[in-house]
Amino acid sequence: MSETSNEAISAPARSQRGIFEPVPPVGAVMVFDADPGTDVRKGLSAIRSEGVKEGGVVLGIGQPLALSLRASIKGLRGFPAMSGLGVAFPSTQGALWVLVRGSEQGEVLDRSLSIQRKLGVGFRLMEEVEGFRYRGGRDLTGYEDGTENPKGEAAVEAAVVAEGEPGVALGTFVAVQRYVHDLERFQGYDAAARDAIIGRRADTNEEIPDAVASAHVKRSAQESFDPPAFMLRRSMPWGGVREHGLYFIAYVESLDRFERVLHRMAGLDDGTVDGLMGFTRAISGGYYFCPPLADDGGLDLRAFGM
């Protein structure tokens, strides 16, 4: 999913600041399973103030952890596995999602290790992804990332839950997927074919007016949905020589926004699959709720009975 407005947005005072910050130079994602036979409350309490106010960390709670805490968050559900013609979006739903943001890799690693240690035996690391900002905010394909991101107050409206019970209002849902790119295949296309897949000119970032129906800009045009499906995207390229791609991150006030776009990308609306799927594939997918902040600057976990 293409994205480039990579600018800071003034975050609501009660929101986790990292949601609204630009893509960092270096980042790490950790997804944890929770052992229902252990005291998960202790681990969660230990990290509730871990960088969430300053923006160094974003924390999201998945449905499995919510259920183990006997909590029901309106709008939170498991990521739905989805498939279309020659394309599949798997679900690898975790209990806890952690994004660590920083300016250099050592800083990010130190904080990641600290979080894992504080969580304790009740949480098991199931996925770890090291990401980074690439060429000023581009995907590894070379195309700008985040062009259609909402800005200012529109971004807040797209990402923040406006109303709800204490501990839910002013929180944010996040949809995440890890994509693996076949860059050799993509670079094997000529420039015109690459532009046609994305629906933009690589050299100018201008949208192609008569882009084909399968172009990503057509499949994911947020304003074309009813109601509109605007999302605040903060995706990061990831990987090395052997394997690489995009870790897609979309912050939304309702997961319905993301799901409608994904449904269309899979071709389930009209049989037309997003052109991106010719060179990339999703290998993970999860939904999480990022709680707002409490008076002390830590996570407000009242909706989870804490």
Image: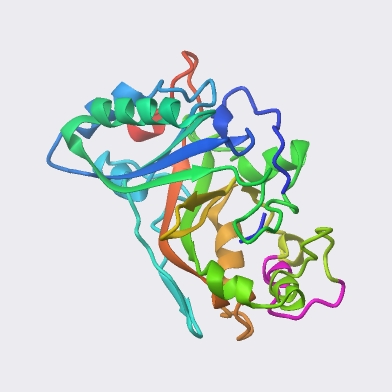
In this orientation, which residue lies closer to the viewer: 211 or 15? 211
In this orientation, which residue lies closer to the viewer: 231 or 25? 25
Quadrant of the drawing holding the N terminus: bottom right
Is 215 in the magenta?
Answer: yes
In this orientation, which residue lies closer to the viewer: 251 or 163? 251
Residue 294 is situated, as x and y percent measured from the top left of the image, at 48, 20
Instruction: Give the residue furthest to the left.
Output: 37
Q: Does 24 sit left or right of 196 as displayed?
A: left
All told, the count of numbered labels is: 0
Q: Is residue 296 above or below residue 242?
A: above
Is residue 161 visible in the rendered image? The answer is yes
Is 162 in the magenta?
Answer: no
**Residue at 27%, 38% in the rendered image:** 69
Q: Does 35 sit left or right of 142 as displayed?
A: left
Residue 139 is situated, as x and y percent measured from the top left of the image, at 62, 55
Main SS of residues in magenta: loop
Q: Is residue 96 above or below residue 267?
A: above
**Residue at 60%, 72% in the rendered image:** 186
Residue 109 is situated, as x and y percent measured from the top left of the image, at 38, 31
Residue 177 is situated, as x and y percent measured from the top left of the image, at 47, 57
To which quarter of the image does residue 54 belong?
Answer: top right
Instruction: Give the residue furthest to the right.
Output: 209
What coloring was used for the rendering? rainbow
Quadrant of the drawing holding the C terminus: top left
Q: Which residues are magenta?
A: 209-220
In this orientation, which residue lies closer to the viewer: 203 or 297? 203
Is residue 306 visible in the rendered image? The answer is no
**Residue at 54%, 29% in the rendered image:** 16
